[in-house]
Image: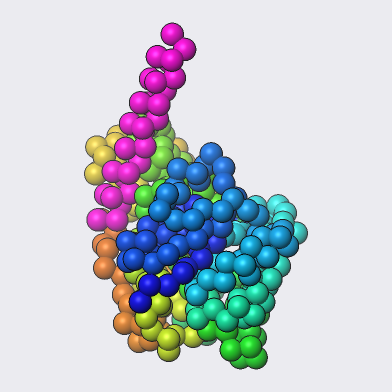
Amino acid sequence: MKQHILVTGGAGFIGSHLVDALLQAGHEVTVIDILSDRNRGNLNPKARNVNADLTKLETIGIVEALAPDVIFHFAGNASVPKSVADPVMDMEINYVATARLLDVASKIGVKRFVFSSTGGGLSSEYTTLPTPENTPSRPLSPYVKHKLASEELGEFYCIHRGLPFVALRFANVYGPRQTVTCGEANVIATFAHKMVRNEPVQVNGNGLQTRDYVYVDDVIDACLMLLDQTNAAGPLNVGSEHEINVSTLHRVMAQYLGYRVPVIKGPADTGASSRSCLDITKIRMTLGWKPTTSIQDGLKRTLDWHREEVERERAKAGLVREFAA
Ligand SMILES: NC(=O)c1ccc[n+]([C@@H]2O[C@H](COP(=O)([O-])OP(=O)(O)OC[C@H]3O[C@@H](n4cnc5c(N)ncnc54)[C@H](O)[C@@H]3O)[C@@H](O)[C@H]2O)c1
């Protein structure tokens, strides 16, 4: 059934892939995002694209007037270091704006509210690995605290106002369109950016630190499944259930590209966990979802996209030179 779906952050890395998939499935899509040179190119012209800041009250008024059937709330500060540098900025977009959106969503009576939360920030060498949703945690960064506070508020709206709220706790999402300027550029985006330009990459620490990487198309499949299945509730981990270390990533990516530039060794990241991996039993049981993209395939598609980016940059620079001549 065709629905009107609002994707906040629909010009961002994950949000833009979701917009494409929703339009492809025949839905009517509205995007609300702050547009900039970094994300404008991700917009799908078939969507209604609104350039607006969700921390402003008038933007919440726009949402009320639009009265979408479903909201995917994917706008936010996605960077842990930025949240540490400016906790109030993080609170305004990652918590206060989410609270206002939850409130207006319950007034409009949306059929589904999906919140982009974090799982990676809750999994470490100090938790059970792979980490299930009910693992107790004491997050230190404002980013994770505000994501969890938003989840709790979403649960309040679910229980007391009947809002069908689901939080998807993403592991480390990777894929095309994730650039080093994206909110939380992970190791894959950072390595890919440098490797396709034949620049040296830096590996911090002993290179054995692990993360759980999930390919963006798999994440989008989980989002689409939520449209049809109304029994899903509470937080759901979205990961690969596999740990991969930095040195292995470097080797696989370098092999695919034929990249031979020696690695620069850097100091270990202070405060970063040495391991992270999510247990996906709950989403497997409730939605029947599991990731289908192998890390090898996901890396190839990501690296191909980064190579094409370099081509696009060269073509653009050539045009500028031609114009200036
Ligand atoms: N990428 C990951 O691995 C990952 C992991 C866990 C959670 N998440 C969450 O998923 C969501 C999407 O992440 P992403 O990687 O696509 O990040 P991204 O930075 O590419 O996209 C976020 C989008 O939100 C928009 N935005 C930021 N502040 C806004 C505001 N005040 N008003 C309107 N729009 C605003 C940005 O312009 C951007 O287009 C974020 O909430 C992030 O915290 C991402």
Q: Please give left or right for residue 67 compared with residue 207 in the image.
A: right
Residue 317 lies in the magenta stretch: yes
Q: Position of residue 278 (x, y in %)?
A: 43, 73
Residue at point 68% right, 65% down?
Answer: 61
| Residue 118 percent across, percent down from the top left | 53, 68
Judging depth in this view, the residue of 20 and 184 nearest the camera is 20
Q: Nearer the viewer, residue 102 or 241?
A: 102
Q: Is residue 89 above or below residue 291?
A: above
Residue extending furthest right? 88
**Left or right: where does residue 143 sit relative to residue 205?**
right
Point out the quarter of the image occupied by ligand 1. Answer: bottom right
Location of residue 30 in the rendering, given as x and y in whole percent from the top left corner: 50, 60
Q: Which residues are magenta?
A: 297-325
Name the quadrant of the N terminus: bottom left
Name the residue rendered at 57%, 66% in the picture: 66
Can you say whether 136 is above or below 98 in the image? below
